[in-house]
């Protein structure tokens, strides 16, 4: 308010009267009494007090952390518009998500560093208030780094999807393919996820994937899909489709109600039928055991103990069907019996010759580096690049010293390989120091020693001391060929099992070197064909019944389709693997590499269809060592709107709307 001191009544204060005389005829404006009388407890503004206060640093850091929320509050339309534009961009060009994530993360790290440097510089110069404000940038950068880290696996998933789409030559993946990739990324570390993203910019496949997504035709196709998803409704949306749970099927209920004795009787009946078909005498047949373990392990055949195990719990849960697994493992046992009939000395000679030839030919697959054990799993390594002469020299070293049952220390192996490395200066030049080159060859040599000991141990097979020698009589020419092939073939399979993660071939590591070995493919073919014969008999019997269970029909049809696809997968995979190995040894043959890539695409599609049918996501399609999505089965429970019909169980292989409606009408009839 405005006061004229001239008109102010005398208040009897001497000091004030004296003050009055000096400012006579002046008007003084006050906004508050604080201008005249200072408050004794007035709050100090620490943001501009010229001192360095930790509380101000914390406050500014917190403001930086909350900056994304603050942006939405202050500029809602701008922020939401930016987000919408980003989402739209990532919808038509999915690979932009990991690209933006990397950019955002790099910018955030830069922001943190810049804030810290500014704070230190201002503090050193005595500009403490500015130093405190620099912590706002540190906070903004920190939240950026945190948000990037939280979304790194999501970005890695998109990056891998982009690479697979590029490999397959498609603009989108189906649900099973996406689920497979998501599962791989989820089970990996954040470091491996970051590596997946960086390969977009550092590998030919990654750069090709990025380029593919920016093609105008691909952008147009995805934009059309997005528009269709947002603004149109297909007839199929009238049908609600849900995967059945195995435990709710007739077969699921049957298995759940079975006693252990009943399961054992079923196992032994199929076991007898399998070995009778192979004509193997009872004295040579493996022992069969029923166990109760985690459902991730279905069972298997052990050559050293000559024993087949079947996991009762996994069978009850619907992880596998007995005909397939028992025939599969019986075929492994049949091969083991054939191998056992080769004299041990001859087997060891065959193994040495085979392994030496692999070295001389320049083996390309991942190999053991000797660390770990057959029980804990071995680490793997890519074979070092060696000249033809060096491979010849190393092959001689392996034959003379490494391919023995002796176990060497690292120092002993290092002394063995040192002259070899020193005599090959071109090899040393590929490494930073001669010591590093020696270390690489030491690991590789140790792996070969382990490789040989594992192979020989496996070749010993089971104890035959109590078996009638007449049952182990000489092999026929055909039997011996099969036995030798099985002996050689087993090396890749054993190494894969020992390392737990070996020989990934293309398309994100979906193909492993041992999957397509001759014996493995043979076992799969035998197992699935045996399974199909049993399923078809069950289906025929079911359809003779009046008002039979449609859910059981759907389950059987899906299993038949899955078995047929698995046979196709393994058969084509064997051919692909042969071409793949040939291609690695002939890198200049571009046409061969093209054939391999085309076959890998075919295999990926088949595998995705198998996974989609089964609801069980297998690492190797063996039906044994697998990761299970609990209790899900393949057949649909399809429910059409009330005016169109009622709920029906139909096979998963019936995928289109017309087919689903036809199934519904068929059942009504």
Image (spheres, rainbow, N blue to C red):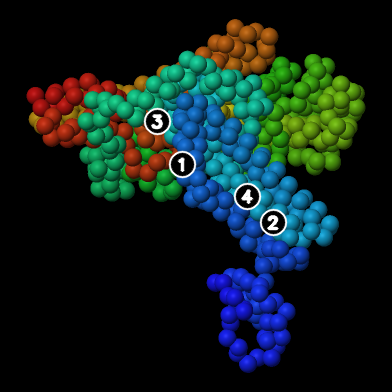
Residue 454 screen position, x and y as percent: 65, 35
Q: Can residue 547 be seen in this view?
A: yes
Nearer to the camera, 207 or 565: 207
Q: Is residue 641 left or right of residue 345?
A: left
Label 4 vs label 1, nearer the camera? 1
Q: In which quarter of the image is residue 175?
A: top left
Is 35 above or below relative to 215? below
Q: How far apart are marks 4 and 1 (CA)?
A: 21 Å
What element does badge 4 sit on? helix
Q: Name the residue under label 2.
A: 133
Q: Quadrant of residue 173?
A: top left
Q: Mark 1 points at which residue?
A: 77
Q: How far apart are marks 3 and 2 (CA)?
A: 49 Å
Mark 2 crowdedness (10 Å alpha carbons): few <14, some 14-19, many ≥20:
many
Q: Mark 3 points at which residue?
A: 175
What element does badge 1 sit on? helix
What element does badge 3 sit on? helix
Residue at the extreme bottom of the image, as rendered: 12
Nearer to the camera, 430 or 344: 430
The residue located at (89%, 23%) in the rendering is 425
Tell me which label, 1 or 3, sits earlier in the chain: 1
What element does badge 2 sit on? helix
Nearer to the camera, 354 or 123: 123
Q: Mark 4 points at which residue?
A: 140
């Amino acid at each position: 308010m405005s006061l004229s001191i001239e008109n102010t009544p005398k208040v009897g204060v001497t000091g004030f009267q004296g003050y009055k005389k000096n400012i006579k005829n002046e008007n003084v404006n006050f906004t508050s009494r604080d201008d005249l009388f200072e408050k004794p407890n007035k709050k100090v503004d620490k943001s501009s007090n010229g001192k360095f206060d930790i509380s101000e640093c914390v406050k500014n850091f917190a403001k930086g952390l909350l900056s994304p929320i603050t942006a939405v509050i202050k500029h809602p339309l701008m922020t939401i518009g930016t987000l919408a534009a980003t989402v739209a961009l990532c919808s038509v060009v999915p690979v932009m998500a990991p690209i933006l994530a990397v950019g955002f993360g790099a910018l955030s790290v830069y922001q943190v560093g810049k804030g810290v440097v500014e704070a230190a510089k201002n503090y050193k110069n005595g500009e403490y208030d500015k130093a405190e404000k620099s912590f706002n940038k540190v906070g903004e950068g920190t939240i950026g780094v945190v948000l990037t880290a939280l979304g790194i696996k999501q970005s890695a998933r998109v990056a891998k999807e982009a690479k697979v789409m590029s490999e397959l030559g498609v603009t989108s993946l189906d649900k099973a393919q996406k689920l497979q990739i998501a599962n791989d990324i989820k089970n990996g570390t954040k470091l491996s996820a970051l590596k997946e993203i960086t390969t977009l910019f550092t590998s030919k496949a990654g750069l090709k994937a990025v380029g593919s997504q920016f093609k105008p035709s691909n952008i147009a196709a995805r934009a059309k899909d997005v528009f269709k998803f947002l603004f149109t409704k297909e007839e199929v949306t009238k049908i609600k489709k849900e995967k059945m749970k195995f435990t709710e099927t007739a077969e699921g209920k049957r298995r759940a109600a079975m006693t252990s004795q009943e399961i054992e009787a079923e196992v032994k009946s199929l076991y007898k039928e399998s070995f009778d078909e192979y004509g193997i005498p009872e004295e040579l047949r493996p022992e069969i055991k029923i166990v109760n373990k985690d459902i991730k392990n279905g069972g298997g055949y052990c050559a050293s103990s000559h024993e087949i195990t079947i996991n009762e719990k996994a069978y009850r849960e619907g992880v596998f069907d007995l005909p397939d697994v028992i025939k599969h493992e019986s075929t492994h046992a049949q091969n083991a019996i054939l191998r056992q009939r080769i004299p041990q000395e001859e087997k060891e000679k065959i193994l040495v010759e085979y392994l030496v030839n692999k070295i001389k030919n320049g083996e390309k697959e991942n190999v053991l580096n000797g660390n770990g054990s057959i029980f804990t799993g071995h680490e793997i390594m890519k074979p070092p690049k060696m000249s033809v002469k060096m491979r010849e020299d190393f092959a001689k070293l392996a034959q003379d010293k490494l391919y023995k049952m002796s176990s060497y220390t690292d120092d002993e192996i290092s002394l063995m390989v040192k002259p070899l490395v020193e005599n090959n200066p071109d090899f040393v030049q590929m490494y930073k120091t001669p010591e590093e080159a020696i270390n690489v060859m030491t690991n590789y040599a140790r792996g070969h020693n382990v490789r040989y000991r594992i192979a020989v141990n496996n070749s010993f097979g089971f104890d035959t001391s109590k078996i009638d020698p007449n049952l182990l009589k000489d092999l026929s020419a055909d039997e011996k060929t099969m036995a030798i092939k099985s002996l050689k073939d087993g090396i890749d399979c054993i190494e894969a099992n020992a390392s737990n993660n070996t020989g990934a071939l293309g398309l994100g590591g979906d193909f492993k070197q041992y999957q397509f070995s001759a014996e493995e493919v043979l076992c799969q073919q035998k197992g699935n064909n045996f399974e199909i014969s049993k399923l078809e008999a069950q289906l025929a019997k079911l359809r003779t019944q009046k008002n039979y269970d449609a859910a059981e029909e759907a389950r059987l049809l899906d299993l038949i389709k899955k078995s047929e696809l698995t046979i196709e997968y393994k058969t084509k995979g064997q051919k692909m693997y042969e071409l793949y190995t040939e291609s690695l040894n002939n890198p200049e043959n571009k046409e061969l590499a093209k054939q391999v890539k085309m076959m890998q695409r075919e295999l990926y599609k088949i595998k995705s269809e198998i996974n989609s049918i089964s609801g069980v996501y297998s690492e190797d399609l063996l039906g044994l060592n697998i990761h299970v999505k609990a209790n899900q089965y393949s057949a649909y429970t399809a429910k059409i709107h009330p005016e169109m019909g009622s709920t029906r169980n139909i096979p998963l292989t019936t995928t289109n709307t017309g087919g689903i409606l036809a199934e519904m009408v068929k059942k009504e009839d």
